Image (cartoon, rainbow, N blue to C red):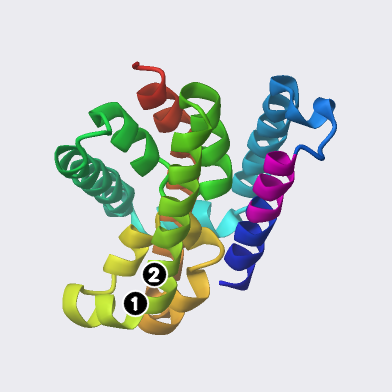
Amino acid sequence: MKDSLLYLAIFTIGLVLALWGVLPDVLLSASISKWILYGLLFFVGIQIGSSKGAFWAIRSIGRRIVWVPVATTLGTFAAAAIASLILPLRSLTDCLSVGAGFAYYSLSSILISGYRGAELGTIALLANIFREFMVLVFAPWMVKHFGPLSPICAGGATTMDTTLPVITRYSGTDYVVVALFHGMIIDFSVPLWVSFFAGLG
């Protein structure tokens, strides 16, 4: 949670500085955002490649583990589609793009900003930060009412890092490898899904 607050604070500082017009033009160019995105994707690859526990989970639990990220993906897209019906100013592809961030707010918000503009990118940032906070705060309630897999599915891409301690505490150590594998798959899928939906129009 501390990291999320730090990211939100940095985002707010950047927003205020840009509004005040005190940043040099080089920082406002589209090429800078593009290279930052490339760097983020590079480090995502490193993070996934170094996550030995997630690969071990496939061998230890078997093919059934694959259904957890599938359920997360389908459930998220269904909720995003419903949100598009409730929010008349947002299209289906807007809502699916935001949902496809799967709580990976730093990467998804940059991607969406590049495709759809800063307004939707900001919405993606806040929505995906809220998704992570929801797991950090409500994990005990989720486990009690919906079972030990619920905070894993709700956590999206964060289950291999920031929400893993909470999942371990309330879902149990038996679900650590599931959370690691789930986080790795969802983490990898974020740039693919976001680019796909945001590029549809």
Q: Is residue 182 magenta?
A: no
Boundaries of the magenta span:
12-20
Q: Residue drawn 28% across and 74% down?
A: 148
Q: Residue drawn 33% across and 49% down?
A: 69
Q: Is residue 18 magenta?
A: yes
Residue that label 1 marks: 138
Q: Secondary structure at mark 2?
A: helix
Residue that label 2 marks: 135
- Quadrant into which the C terminus falls: top left
Q: Quadrant of residue 200?
A: top left
Percent across and percent down for residue 72 are 29, 50
Q: Is residue 185 visible?
A: no
Hey, what amino acid is under mark 1?
Answer: Phe
- Quadrant into which the N terminus falls: bottom right
Q: Quadrant of residue 6?
A: bottom right
Percent across and percent down for residue 96 are 30, 35
Percent across and percent down for residue 175 are 38, 71
Percent across and percent down for residue 65 are 32, 54
Q: CA distance from mark 2 to mark 1?
A: 5 Å
